[in-house]
Structures are given as structure tokens and as C-alpha cells.
Image: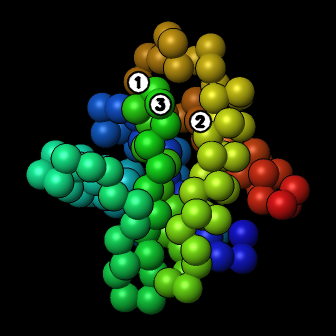
Amino acid sequence: MRYIDEIWIIDPDGITLFNYSQKKSEDGALIGGFFSGIYKFLKEIRNEAINSINLGNSKFVFYQSPEGFLFIAQAKIMSIDEEIIRRLKLVESEFFEKYQDILHTWDGNINRFFHFSKNINKVFSSI
């Protein structure tokens, strides 16, 4: 994951299901919710989805799945959005493959997704 520092997976209701960080993150759920709110707000007022937001030396790249899940990556500023989105789509595929059954009957317990970091490592080591 040369270019990606952090990933969030957020459900259609804005709940952070999973957060992966290569370094210590302050509060993944809070930050994920914040960016989910920004994404939805900008999508509403612009009538189109945003791909990324630059902030300091980082950029936050957004991909919304057809099911409404939001995949966000914090990446190096020089990263190419399309490449980051391609990687987020790989994460999406792996996430839905692993948790498809759980998501249909999900009880609100985000701890069910805790072990997805192993899959994140697998996705990025195969690139």
C-alpha cells in the first residue's frame, strides 16, 4: 500500500463498519463519519458525486458502491485518483465476498468486521 495510508468502509446509513490505518488513527469511526457526511453533503448540493478532496499533504478518495456503501482512502497527494479507486474496488469486492451474508442480517455489531484487515493486506500484497 505504497500510496494509501488509511481506508474506511461506511454503510449507506453513515456507520463506519471498518477502518484500516498503517499508523495510529485518532478515531476511525469519527473520521469516517465526518467524511461520509461531507461526501453526502457535497453530492446533494452539487448533484454529482465527488472523487477526491485534497487536504494538506493527503487526499481523500471516495468510491460509492452500487449498494450505497462508501469506500474512502487517505492517500498521498500525488496519487492518481483512478488508481486509488481501482484499489478501493478490489477492497469492495473482497469485503462483499467475505461479509455478504452478514450484511443482509447485520445486527449493528461492527466488531464482526474487525478481522478484515487480513483481507486488506491480502488485496494490497497481490497488486
Is the residue marked by circle 3 packed among few (<14), some (14-19), or many (20+) residues within 10 Å?
few
- Secondary structure beneath label 2: helix
Amino acid type, callout 3: Pro
Amino acid type, callout 2: Phe
> Who comes first in sequence, dot 3 or dot 2?
3
Res 32 quadrant in image: bottom left
Numbered badge on residue 66: 3
- Residue at x 82% of width, y 51% of height: 122
Of all residues shown, which one is farthest toward the left? 45
Tell me the CA gap for discs 1 and 2.
11 Å
* Residue 83 on image: x %, y %: 64, 65
Which quadrant does the C terminus fall into?
bottom right
- Which residue is tagged 2? 113
- Secondary structure beneath label 1: loop
- Residue at x 44% of width, y 56% of height: 62
Tell me the CA gap for discs 3 and 1.
21 Å
Residue 50's place in the image compared with 24, above or below, is: above
* Residue 72 on image: x %, y %: 47, 56
Question: Do the CB atoms of the residues marked 3 and 1 lie less than 8 Å apart?
Answer: no
* In front of the other: 13 or 49: 49
Numbered badge on residue 15: none
- Which residue is tagged 1? 108
> Who comes first in sequence, dot 3 or dot 1?
3
